[in-house]
């Protein structure tokens, strides 16, 4: 793909999605014309309508961040999760078939069962235990089965970033006026800052080396460690105490260990993602007290 400044990116979910908004900003900053959509409406589930939409928009690249992301609620609404996470990517892929427009589709570390114990590679078995993880994996497969020539699937993890509710922001809001809080310490993953992910996605896309990639900030953390560092960066005195998952019951089974190995991305781009700790500090410093209290 050329690096002409006049190219157009269409970000599905870029109007209000956590990652989508960062993608829209990064691509615009890089000189792309950017078009964004809100969450998918009924017409998006029709191949012909979607194809007409793509033809009208005429983008050089489509990025799909549309997803059913409420991990616990998905256990109660498996059909709706399946519709957004499995059926819709297949429809997007079919609508793009033959149009020669590259597609970037985002997926998740929750496709893994978390039992491996060392960082997950792209080709490791994806045996999700939650409805969310299973439907996201099925969405990947739906796209891969179409045999699209120009497809990136990017699995990422534990997102935090500006303009939308996320785990780090929730922790800061809770910890602002509290003396202590208990946060799960027996789930370990790859915290990832959406502006970083957007920049790294852009770099990967420019290589034209299509395929399945893991992409996250470097390092690993438990939810407790992530919350502790965010609270420290904010200068709050709240103590973050480690607790086991059984003390914070959640409907969906989450992987105990879902750290992503990003070396395939580094081989393709020459970029080593910066540590999540640097990124979380930047994020916390960039949020104003007013934002955090929302
Ligand atoms: N957030 C994470 O920690 C995380 C971790 C790993 C992978 N990912 C993946 O990264 C991608 C982007 O995630 P994100 O956190 O940016 O997602 P998000 O902000 O929750 O949502 C992304 C888009 O999907 C829409 N959406 C959310 N829930 C929906 C539902 N139930 N029905 C229909 N549309 C819905 C959103 O609409 P609204 O803005 O109107 O809600 C938005 O347009 C997804 O593929 C996700 O699976 C996310």
Image: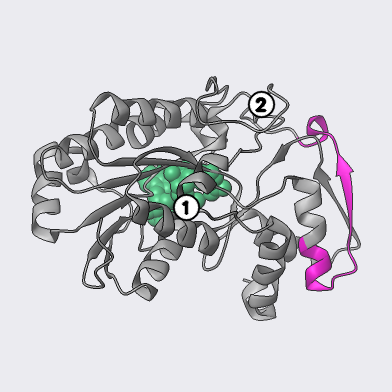
Q: Respond yes or no on whether mark 2 lies under 8 Å from ligand 1.
A: no
Judged from the image, the secondary structure of the residue bearing numbered disc 2 is loop
Asked if residue 146 lies left or right of residue 51, the reply is right
Asked if residue 98 lies left or right of residue 32, the reply is left
Q: Respond yes or no on whether mark 1 lies under 8 Å from ligand 1.
A: no
Distance from Cα at disc 2 to Cα at disc 1: 27 Å
Q: Position of residue 191 (x, y in %)?
A: 65, 50
Can you see residue 26?
A: yes
Magenta region includes residue 246: yes
Instruction: Please state which of residues 234 and 114 is positioned toward the viewer in this rendering.
Output: 114
Q: Where is residue 78 in the image (x, y as percent from the top left)?
A: 44, 27
In the image, which disc is placed on residue 41? Answer: none
Quarter of the N terminus within the rendering: bottom left
Judged from the image, the secondary structure of the residue bearing numbered disc 1 is helix
Read off the residue under disc 1.
269
The crowd level at tag 2 (other Cα within 10 Å; few <14, some 14-19, many 20+) is: many
Asked if residue 212 is positioned above or below residue 216 in the image, the reply reads above
Read off the residue under disc 2.
114
Asked if residue 29 is positioned above or below residue 222 in the image, the reply reads below
Q: Where is residue 241 in the image (x, y as percent from the top left)?
A: 90, 49
Name the residue at 11% across, 45% down. 99
The crowd level at tag 1 (other Cα within 10 Å; few <14, some 14-19, many 20+) is: some
Name the residue at 61% across, 29% down. 252
Instruction: Please state which of residues 216 and 186 is positioned toward the viewer in this rendering.
Output: 216
Quarter of the C terminus within the rendering: bottom right
Instruction: Please state which of residues 279 and 205 is positioned toward the viewer in this rendering.
Output: 205
Start and end of the magenta stretch? 230-248
Magenta region includes residue 244: yes
Name the residue at 26% across, 52% down. 62
Q: Position of residue 21 (x, y in %)?
A: 42, 64
Can you see residue 68?
A: no
């Amino acid at each position: 793909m050329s690096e002409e400044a006049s190219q157009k990116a269409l970000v599905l979910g870029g109007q209000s999605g956590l990652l989508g908004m960062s993608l829209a900003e990064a691509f615009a900053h890089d000189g792309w014309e950017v078009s964004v959509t809100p969450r998918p409406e009924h017409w998006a589930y029709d191949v012909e309508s979607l194809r007409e939409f793509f033809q009208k928009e005429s983008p050089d690249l489509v990025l799909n961040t549309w997803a059913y992301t409420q991990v616990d609620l998905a256990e109660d609404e498996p059909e709706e999760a399946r519709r957004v996470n499995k059926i819709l990517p297949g429809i997007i892929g079919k609508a793009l078939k033959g149009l020669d427009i590259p597609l970037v589709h985002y997926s998740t570390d929750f496709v893994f069962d978390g039992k491996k114990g060392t960082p997950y590679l792209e080709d490791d078995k994806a045996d999700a235990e939650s409805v969310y993880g299973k439907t996201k994996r099925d969405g990947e497969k739906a796209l891969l089965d179409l045999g699209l020539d120009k497809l990136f699937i990017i699995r990422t993890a534990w997102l935090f970033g500006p303009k939308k509710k996320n785990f780090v922001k929730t922790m800061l809001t809770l910890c602002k006026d509290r003396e202590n809080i208990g946060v799960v310490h027996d789930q370990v993953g790859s915290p990832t800052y959406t502006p970083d992910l957007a920049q790294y996605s852009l770099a990967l896309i420019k290589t034209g080396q299509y395929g399945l990639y893991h992409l996250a900030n470097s390092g690993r953390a438990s939810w407790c460690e992530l919350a502790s560092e965010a609270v420290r960066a904010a200068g709050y005195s709240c103590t973050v105490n480690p607790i086991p998952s059984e003390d914070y019951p959640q409907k969906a089974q989450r992987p105990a260990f879902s750290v992503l190995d990003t070396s395939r991305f580094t081989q393709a781009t020459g970029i080593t993602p910066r540590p999540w700790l640097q990124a979380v500090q930047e994020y916390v410093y960039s949020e104003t007290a007013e934002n955090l209290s929302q």
